[in-house]
Image (cartoon, rainbow, N blue to C red):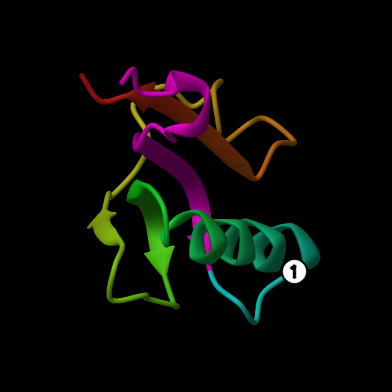
Amino acid sequence: MTADISSQKKRLRVAVLARIFSTSAGGAERYCASLVKHLASQHEIHVFAQDIRTQYPQVVFHQVPLFLSPSTLAESNCICHLHMVANA
């Protein structure tokens, strides 16, 4: 019997970059935290943030003093970046 590959969900490794990770900050921050909480039930999530105010047990958090490239995050209008890689 052949396995139906389309029905098998791949577990992704997801990196989330945010200045502030919180459920009580602005709307974009709350949306980012909600998205992480939802994705964490099926994927491996790592959050990289300068200010971590909310934590979930199934998520790995990395507090970073500042982002290496200010133009990518600190000077941009985007609050939450997601990078996904399928596990081999």
The percent position of residue 70, horizontal first and vertical second, equals: 49, 27
Q: Quarter of the image containing the C terminus?
A: top left
Residue at figure coordinates x 37%, y 76% from the top left: 55
Residue at figure coordinates x 34%, y 38% from the top left: 11
Residue reaching furthest to the bottom? 24
Disc 1 residue type (three-letter): Gly
Residue at figure coordinates x 61%, y 57% from the top left: 35
Task: From the viewer's side, name the closer residue of 49 and 55.
Answer: 55
Instruction: Identify residue for label 1.
Output: 26
Point out the stretch of residues depicted in magenta: 1-21
Task: From the viewer's side, name the closer residue of 84 and 2.
Answer: 2
Residue 73 magenta-drawn?
A: no
Q: Is residue 70 above or below residue 81?
A: above
Query: Which quadrant would residue 57 be assigned to in this image?
Result: bottom left
Q: Is residue 4 left or right of residue 86?
A: right
Q: Is residue 24 above or below residue 9?
A: below
